[in-house]
Image (cartoon, grey):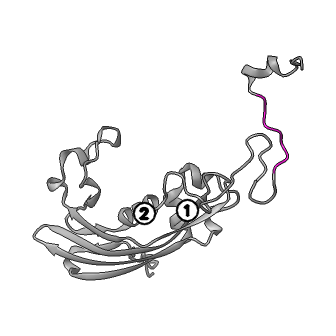
């Protein structure tokens, strides 16, 4: 009786073995990966519908080489991530294509703060350029994930002159003028019926 064949898990496109360095890695970034990366960001969660169906994603082209026990990575992560406009909550497609230059360090070389819990870490100016790895395999997934998160500004706009939503009725003032009357300041409400002698 023969044993059932073992299922072989395909290698992750994000993982590179140190023994294979130097190496060039091109990774296709799917819409589902981007949706998972930016899940929980308020301006992403404000979008209606299934975020995985958006035209998001991209490509990472990265060069890796070893230097004693460290691994240096450089290249670009290009693509698109869609979030809500900070004024009208309509979709805004943000393009990314910044160059990437980071160093992966083995755990014993990482600054002590980087191994602490997230609540206890204070990031310094250069801390975003350092990632841990186990000494044998470099996992590019956290680096690529972070590039999509960092591409989202604090208050993105669909266009510079976006008129936003009416604070009273919620209508999008970019599509039609709002007919709501400006509310009376409650401090002056008592004066509203006052008639001055002519």
- First in sequence, mark 1 or 2: give its number: 1
Residue for badge 1: 35
Q: Is residue 7 left or right of residue 56?
A: left
Which residue corresponds to the image point at 30% horizontal and 38% vertical from the top-left? Answer: 120
Classify 10 Å Cα crowding around label 1: few (below 14), some (14-19), many (20 and above): many
Decide if residue 185 is in sight here: yes
Could you tell me which quadrant the N terminus lies in?
A: bottom left
Against 185, is 32 above or below?
below
Residue drawn 59% across the image and 60% down it: 160
* Left or right: 132, with 158 as reference point: left
- Secondary structure found at label 2: helix
Residue at (14%, 55%) from the top-left corner?
Answer: 109
Q: Residue 118, labelled with which disc?
A: none
Residue range in magenta is: 178-184
Q: Position of residue 104 (x, y in %)?
A: 23, 64
User: Residue 32: where, in percent of width, then height?
Assistant: 55, 67
Q: Which mark is residue 145?
A: 2
The chief SS type of the magenta part is loop
Label 1, secondary structure: give it: helix
| Viewer-side residue, 115 vs 2 | 115
Is 15 magenta? The answer is no
| Residue 8, position as x, y percentages in the image | 42, 77
| Of the pair 13 and 181, the residue shown nearer to us | 181
């Amino acid at each position: 009786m023969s044993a059932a064949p073992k299922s072989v898990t395909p290698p992750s496109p994000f993982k590179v073995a140190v023994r294979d360095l130097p190496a060039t890695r091109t990774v296709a970034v799917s819409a589902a990966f981007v949706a998972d990366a930016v899940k929980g960001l308020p301006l992403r969660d404000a979008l209606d519908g299934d975020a995985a169906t958006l035209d998001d994603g991209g490509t990472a082209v990265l060069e890796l080489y070893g230097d004693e026990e460290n691994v240096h990575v450089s290249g670009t992560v290009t693509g698109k991530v869609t979030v809500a406009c900070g004024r009208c909550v309509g979709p805004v497609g943000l393009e990314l294509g910044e160059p990437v230059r980071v160093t992966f360090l083995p755990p014993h070389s990482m600054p002590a703060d980087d191994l602490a819990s997230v609540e206890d870490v204070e990031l310094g100016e250069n801390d975003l350029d350092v990632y841990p790895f186990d000494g044998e395999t470099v996992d590019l997934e956290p680096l690529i994930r972070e590039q999509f998160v960092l591409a989202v500004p604090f208050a993105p706009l669909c266009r510079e002159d976006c008129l936003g939503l009416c604070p009273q009725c919620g209508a999008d003032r970019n599509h039609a003028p709002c007919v709501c009357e400006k509310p009376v300041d409650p401090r002056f409400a008592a004066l509203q019926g006052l008639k001055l002698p002519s």
